[in-house]
C-alpha cells in the first residue's frame, strides 16, 4: 500500500470466527518452524530481485529470528506485494503477487526450509494488475484484478478464479451498467461458499480517485450481482477507499474496513445486500486485519498503532486494546501462526523496513512485542531489512510486504 502519501495529498486537496478463509484455525500444539517473507528491492519502475526470505521462527531455537534461506523468485521484480494471508491447507503452494510486474507466482512450501517457485499464474485475458487472493474449499483461488483492458470508460477491474496451478478457470468484469464510467479498482476480497457468494472492494494502488464501492458476486460462476456505494456520513471520509473484507463466523455476513478507518457490516447477501456503518476509528491507514475468534487486530499505518476489536457482535464492534508502535513503523500487514499466539507484522513501505513478531492475548486482546525476535545486539525488537547482506547477492535495503508462518 505505497500510495498512502498520495491519498493524504488528495484529502488535503479536499478530495475529501471461523472468519472466512483468512482467519486463524484453532491453535495447534506447537509454533511454526519458519517465517516466509515476500520481499524485494524493486519499486514501481525500478526493477530488482523479488525474493522469498525464510527466517527461523522457532522460539526455542538458538537461531530464532535469523535468516535461514533466501530464494530469488524474479531477478527483475517490480513490487513484491500480497501473498495469501495464510498458507493453504489444501495445497502445497501459495500465491505471491509482484504488483509492479503483474506477475503472480506459486511458492511451493512442501520442503519448508527450501521453498521453490513451482509455477506462475497465467495472464488474465482482458485484465491486468492482479492484486489479492482468497483460497476456496476446493483448492482453487479467487484473485482480484485492478484493471480491465482499457476499452471501457473507467477501465473497471475483474474478479477471476484460478486453479491451484494458476490456470484460469473463469473471469468476470467489475463493470456495472448502474455505475457507468466508474473507476472500480477491484482490490480486497472474501468468499462465502456457504451461501455461494463473494465480495470485493474497490481501492487504487495509485493516486487516482476511484469508486468507493463493494461488489457482490455469485461465487459458483462469478456473476456480478450487485454494486453498492459505501454510505457517507456528513463531516468525515470514512467511506473512502473500501479496503479489506473478512467473512464473519455465521458464514453469511462480512466485515469491511476502509483505508480511512470506517467499519461496515455487509449483510443480506442472498437477497438484497446491505452495507451498514458500525464504527469509525481515529487515524488513516486501516489496512490488512487479522481475525481470530471474536478478535480483530487492525493495523493503522498513520496512527502508528494496532487496535484490537471485539467483533463478537459485528453490528457493534468495540475497541478493547491498543498498542502503539514507534513513529518509524507504519503497520500494514498482519498474519497469524496457527500453532501459537504469534502474529507477524510488516510496514506498508513508508518507514524503515522491519519484520515484527507480536503476541496476542486471546482473552484481553492485548498485543505485545515478542522481545526475543530481534537482530543480534539490537536494543529494539524486530528484524531490520534496512541494510541486509543475503546469500543470493542482495545487499542494502529490502522492502517486505506479505509474510506467512510456515509449519
Image (cartoon, rainbow, N blue to C red):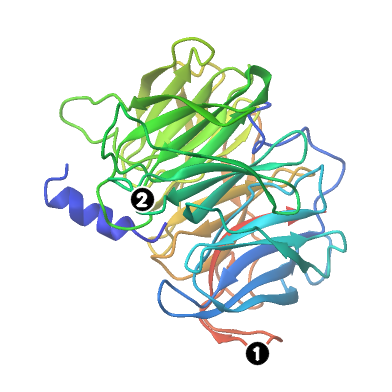
The residue carrying mark 2 is: 204
x and y percentages locating residue 195 in the rendered image: 63, 17
Nearest the viewer among 301 and 90 is: 90
- Residues at marks 2 and 1 touching, judged by CB atoms closer than 8 Å: no
Nearest the viewer among 369 and 265 is: 265
x and y percentages locating residue 201 in the rendered image: 43, 37
Would you say 303 lies left or right of 314 here? Answer: left
Q: Residue at x 61, y 29 (%)?
A: 221
User: Please, is residue 344 above or below residue 140 in the view?
Assistant: below
x and y percentages locating residue 57 in the rendered image: 76, 61
The residue carrying mark 1 is: 393
Disc 1 residue crowd, few under 14, some 14–19, many 20+, Cα 10 Å: few
Residue 90 falls in which quadrant of the image? top right
- Of the numbered discs 2 and 1, the one sitting upstream in the chain is 2
Q: How many marks?
A: 2
Numbered mark located on residue 98 in the image: none
x and y percentages locating residue 277 in the rendered image: 35, 21
Nearest the viewer among 48 and 157 is: 157
Residue 329 falls in which quadrant of the image? bottom left
- Residue 57 seen in this snapshot: no
Which secondary structure, mark 1?
A: loop
Nearest the viewer among 394 and 185 is: 185
Q: Which quarter shows the N terminus?
A: bottom left
Measure the C-alpha gap from mark 2 to mark 1: 33 Å
Would you say 20 lies left or right of 67 here? Answer: left
Disc 2 residue crowd, few under 14, some 14–19, many 20+, Cα 10 Å: many
- Which mark is in front, 2 or 1? 2
Q: Residue at x 29, y 46 (%)?
A: 154
Would you say 402 lies left or right of 255 here? Answer: right
Which secondary structure, mark 2?
A: loop
Amino acid at each position: 500500500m505505497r500510495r498512502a502519501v498520495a491519498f493524504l495529498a488528495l484529502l488535503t486537496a479536499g478530495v475529501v470466527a471461523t472468519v472466512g478463509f483468512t482467519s486463524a484455525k484453532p491453535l495447534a500444539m506447537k509454533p511454526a518452524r519458519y517465517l516466509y517473507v515476500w520481499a524485494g528491492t524493486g519499486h514501481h519502475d525500478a526493477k530488482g530481485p523479488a525474493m522469498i526470505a525464510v527466517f527461523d521462527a522457532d522460539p526455542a531455537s538458538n537461531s530464532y529470528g535469523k535468516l535461514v534461506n533466501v530464494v530469488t523468485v524474479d531477478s527483475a521484480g517490480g513490487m513484491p506485494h500480497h501473498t495469501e494471508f495464510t498458507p493453504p491447507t489444501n495445497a502445497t503452494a501459495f500465491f505471491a503477487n509482484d504488483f509492479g510486474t503483474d506477475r503472480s507466482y506459486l511458492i511451493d512450501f512442501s520442503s519448508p526450509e527450501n521453498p521453490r517457485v513451482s509455477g506462475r499464474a497465467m495472464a488474465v485475458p482482458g485484465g491486468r494488475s492482479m492484486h489479492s487472493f482468497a483460497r476456496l474449499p476446493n483448492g482453487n483461488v479467487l484473485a482480484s484484478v485492478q484493471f480491465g483492458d482499457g476499452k471501457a470508460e473507467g477501465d473497471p477491474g475483474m474478479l477471476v478464479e484460478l486453479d491451484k496451478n494458476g490456470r484460469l478457470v473463469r473471469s468476470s468484469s467489475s463493470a456495472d451498467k448502474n455505475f457507468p464510467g466508474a473507476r472500480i479498482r477491484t482490490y480486497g476480497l472474501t468468499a462465502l461458499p456457504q451461501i455461494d457468494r463473494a465480495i470485493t472492494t474497490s481501492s487504487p494502488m495509485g493516486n487516482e480517485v476511484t469508486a468507493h464501492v463493494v461488489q457482490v458476486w455469485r461465487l459458483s460462476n462469478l456473476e456480478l450481482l450487485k454494486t453498492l456505494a459505501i454510505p457517507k456520513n456528513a463531516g468525515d471520509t470514512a467511506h473512502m477507499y473500501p479496503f479489506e473484507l473478512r467473512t464473519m463466523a455465521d458464514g453469511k455476513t462480512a466485515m469491511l474496513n476502509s483505508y480511512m478507518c470506517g467499519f461496515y457490516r455487509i449483510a443480506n447477501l442472498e437477497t438484497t445486500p446491505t452495507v451498514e456503518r458500525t464504527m469509525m476509528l481515529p487515524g488513516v491507514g486501516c489496512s490488512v486485519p487479522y481475525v481470530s475468534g471474536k478478535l480483530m487486530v487492525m493495523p493503522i499505518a498513520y496512527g502508528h498503532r494496532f487496535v484490537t476489536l471485539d467483533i463478537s457482535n459485528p453490528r457493534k464492534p468495540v475497541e478493547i486494546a491498543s498498542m502503539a508502535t514507534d513513529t518509524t513503523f507504519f503497520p500494514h500487514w498482519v498474519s497469524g501462526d496457527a500453532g501459537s499466539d504469534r502474529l507477524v507484522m510488516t510496514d506498508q513501505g513508508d518507514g524503515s523496513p522491519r519484520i515484527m513478531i507480536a503476541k496476542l492475548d486471546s482473552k484481553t486482546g492485548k498485543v505485545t512485542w515478542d522481545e526475543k525476535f530481534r537482530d543480534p545486539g539490537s536494543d529494539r525488537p524486530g528484524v531490520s531489512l534496512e541494510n541486509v547482506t543475503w546469500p543470493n547477492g542482495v545487499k542494502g535495503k529490502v522492502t517486505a510486504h506479505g509474510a506467512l508462518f510456515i509449519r
